[in-house]
Amino acid sequence: MLSLLAVRLRPHLRPRTLLLLPALCLLYVIVLIPFTPGIRDIRKAKVDQPAQIYSADGKLLAEFKPTHREWVSLKQISPNVVDALIATEDRRFHEHHGIDWRRTASAALHTFSGNRQGGSTLTQQLARNLYPDEVGRSQTLTRKLKEAITAFKIEAVYSKDEILETYLNTVPFLYNAYGIEMAARTYFGRSAGQLDVLESATLIGMLKGNSYYNPVINPERALDRRNIVLGQMVRFGHLAPATLDALKKRPLRIDFERQTEEPGRAPHFAQQLRKWLIAWADDHDFNIYSDGLLVRTTIDSRLQSMAMQSLMWQGNQLQSIANAAWGGRGGCANANGDLARAFVRETGEYRAARDAGANDADALKHLVADRSFMRTVCENKTRVQAAFLALDPRNGQIKAWVGSRDFTQDPFDHVQQARRQPGSTFKPFVYGAAFERGAMPTDTFIDQDVTIPVAGNETWHPTDEAPPSGRPVSLRDGIAYSKNRITAQLMQTVGPARVARLARNMGVRESPLDEVPSLALGTSPVTLKEMVSAYGSIANDGNYMEPLLVTRIENRQGDVLAQFDSTPERALSVDAAHKLIDVMRDVVNRGTGSTIRTRFGIRADVAGKTGTTQDNADGWFILMHPQLVAGAWVGFNDSRVTLRSDYWGQGAHSALPMVGDFTQRALRSHLIDARARFDLQAPPGAWQTAVTRLRDWIDQTFGKSSKPTAPKPGQTATQKPVRVKRAPAEPEAQVTEEAPQQPPVFQTMPPLLPTASDAASEAPASAP
């Protein structure tokens, strides 16, 4: 009964149904429009507008691109590429408005008959490539409709040439090569404008399936596909038919080379900045790859170049020493067999041999006998590494940042990522904590054997290169000559907890510090960035300034979006900071860092500290100038490897030359003022200022001015004497004015026992 009724009603419903279906389809399309990219997004996506990173002196340091791509205009692309693309992918490209209805209908018929074909135009493919998240990639009707809507929008905004240019610059070609320019360089070693017909056909042929038609690993498939593209070019009038047979017989002639991104002027700095900028952009609704941000950094490109040159110069010399120490290139097996075998056991080749069933002896014997393998292992392990950082202590702005000897060889950043024992460069925190408690540079300790009890019924016995003299040594001499026994006794007096707290306040804020007596000699690993930042606090009258990477961020129109500066935080009293600078001057005037004066001829007002760790695994030196603090670290990625020299392994001979050469260059270039001096005069207090003003008022009011005085030579009777603020004497001749002598506070104070928080002591660091 129901079926009979349906048959009778069907002719009456047919016209309504025919009208209803298009209406429903149209409604569905309208519903999908808000879920496709808007016109504003499409305008932004026409070309990449990556964040551009500029130095403080206006030099381009880097561009943050999402992929390895170099944008070229359509005029810079060979016409052969465009002809091959249109003939193969969209022959009616210049006739349609985003969708080729004839091709779409033909593809649908073939698909329904079991022969699946694609009907997307270049504009639709571009929509899918630019907006994979919004359009999607699933083979559904919804995805095709979104793709078509987006294609219409693109055609409404851009010309055909602009669409072709954008398409060719955004399509992927494997091996991290995006766009036709990088593809041309990767597969043929030339630019996109130099591609001939065969090369153009090969690259366009890859678009059907990059991996399947990869000319590097599937040359036969790539050749067949290239010839199909050539046939299409002939069919649609882009190539003369007479040339086809000859062209098809030509080989591929691939000249493959992976393209590497240029490291730039400050690659490690840019690497760290990218992380920071991504977080900032996410918080403020910006995209570092497309919003055209202009980032003004604190780096000075001139100082950056000097730092890289100094590090390369000294690093190469140290590498020669390391090669000799380890038996020449690839000779670590001869220099230290046990350690070389340990290196081998850590390789993937050794693990593969063991997984294949070889025992330890056989795997080692086979690999050690492979000279090429051992050369690679030894060169990697015995490659000298170094890091360098310089900042302005007055505002915390980082001026130079070098994270390794060669970014392309070792992108690991030894400035911020590597934590190494600082050795004696940590000692200023001990002396600073003592000066904070009232100690004077003239206070003394006896140079004698020291045994300090630590937790677990153990003792710590710090030593120096020279045996104990039994004589009193002042704190000034203790830091100048980096006396471990004197520093250890001072540590007993002030306590590890107080020293660790001061180090954190001054800049060592990320690395954990073990509050044990041996902390005095730098046994807790820290980063170079933390140490240079902390020395900046010393140079800045005890005020900590957070290290600054960026001064401001602008949009592409030059409008300022954000500005950044550091706020001073009191970490050490002014008086203690001045005492610390004064005694650290002696390090470079006559102590372990004296080659700053004797070898590099630096006469400016500077102070610093050397540092060396156990077995000479790490060499450090940090130098303070009123306008610039610079520090260097030297070592190996594997701390088991050292320079194997008691001379070259010391920070005074490994790291100091980098800082000395850099500072010498900066002074000669007048990027820092050779006449600048640390102002070690304490500012007058409020009471002293008031008394001085009152005295001046009394002098002016009650008679001193009523009695004319004879003019001084060269001064007329109408001139008034001018009070001139004299600069302090040169560092070598400076005399520090001390308070009246009192019994040394720290000599008479009994040593403090370790607190309950003291853990087991680590091995002491060697004296630099």
Image (cartoon, rainbow, N blue to C red):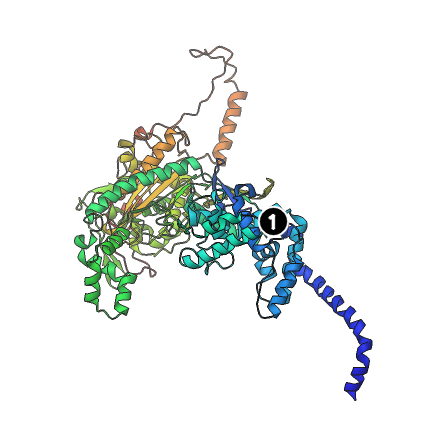
Picture quadrant where residue 659 is located = top left
Location of the N terminus by quadrant is: bottom right
Percent from the top left, x then y, of residue 725? Answer: 43, 25
Q: Is residue 398 visible?
A: yes
Q: Tell me: residue 232, above or below residue 10.
A: above
Q: Is 745 left, or right, of 211 in this rendering?
A: left
Percent from the top left, x then y, of residue 674? Answer: 38, 29
Q: Is 684 left, or right, of 5 in this rendering?
A: left
The one nearer the camera, 749 or 680, is: 680
Q: Is 56 left, or right, of 654 in this rendering?
A: right
Picture quadrant where residue 580 is located = top left
Q: Is residue 65 visible?
A: no
Location of the C terminus by quadrant is: top left
Residue labelled with disc 1: 163
The one nearer the camera, 51 or 708, is: 51
Q: Tell me: residue 571, above or below residue 209.
A: above
